[in-house]
Image (cartoon, helix red, strand yellow):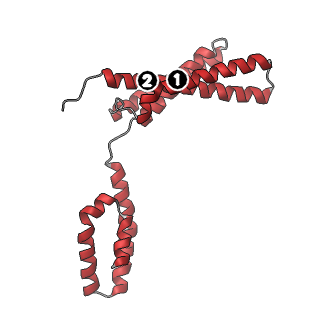
Amino acid sequence: MRLYQGLLCLYPRRFREEYGADMVLLFTEQLRDGPAPRVWLRTAVDLTITAPTCHLETHMHRPPTSFVPLAIGTVSVAGLLFALVGGSSPGMVGLGLAVAAIAGAVAVTAWRQNRTVAAAPPTGEHWWRFLATGVAVLVALTVVTTITGELDSWSWMLAMVVLLSGLISIAAGFVLGVVHLAGHHGPRAAG
């Protein structure tokens, strides 16, 4: 019985709290009425199937998060910033605008399906850190590239990765800041 009670820990806590005592009682009755190897085999099969299913159902019934629309919105803003930075090259501007438009459309679609974007994740309170970090990265990149002069191909690739990281950080700060401010100035829930 102790082994079976230990195996019940494989189920989600709420499930155990609601059904655990009944499951132990049923298992005890099954052991009393039938051969132990058959009961254990049936229990092992049931546990293998139902424990993962219960965990999956627990995740499916959680309220949706705003992470996906925010992440895609961040990519959209980063694409727009990339288009602004790559202003001298029509290809770069087009690429940035295309990424901004596509990611923006996907972010709006995800937001409409989610409807909880105003509930920003805990990092929404620190949106300014993302913004400041991105600006600091861009300033540092500008200073380093000005001091070093022309870059070889590997340094240029590294500089582009740093540039993209800075733009993504700025975009994340911008999106989280807008969502955070909208949550503070938007309609208040009654209650």
Q: Which residue is mark 1?
A: 131
The answer, for residue 14, to whether it is visible in the render is yes
Q: Tell me which corner region of the image, top left, top right, bottom left or bottom right, holds residue 149.
A: top right
Say which residue appears at 58% left-offset and 24% top-offset: 134
Question: SS class of the residue under badge 1?
Answer: helix
Q: What type is the residue that disc 2 sits on?
A: Gly
Q: Where does residue 49 sit, x and y in percent of width and height? A: 38, 66
Q: Which residue is mark 2?
A: 177
Q: Where does residue 111 sit, x and y in percent of width and height? A: 37, 31
Q: What type is the residue that disc 1 sits on?
A: Leu
- In the picture, the quarter occupied by the C terminus is top left
- Which of the two discs, 2 and 1, labels the residue nearer the N terminus? 1
Question: 158 or 132, which lies in front?
Answer: 132
Q: Residues at badges 2 and 1 in contact (C-beta under 8 Å)? A: yes
List the single residue furthest toward the left.
191
Q: CA distance from mark 2 to mark 1?
A: 9 Å
Question: SS class of the residue under badge 2?
Answer: helix
Image: 154 above or below 32: above
Question: 2 or 30, which lies in front?
Answer: 2
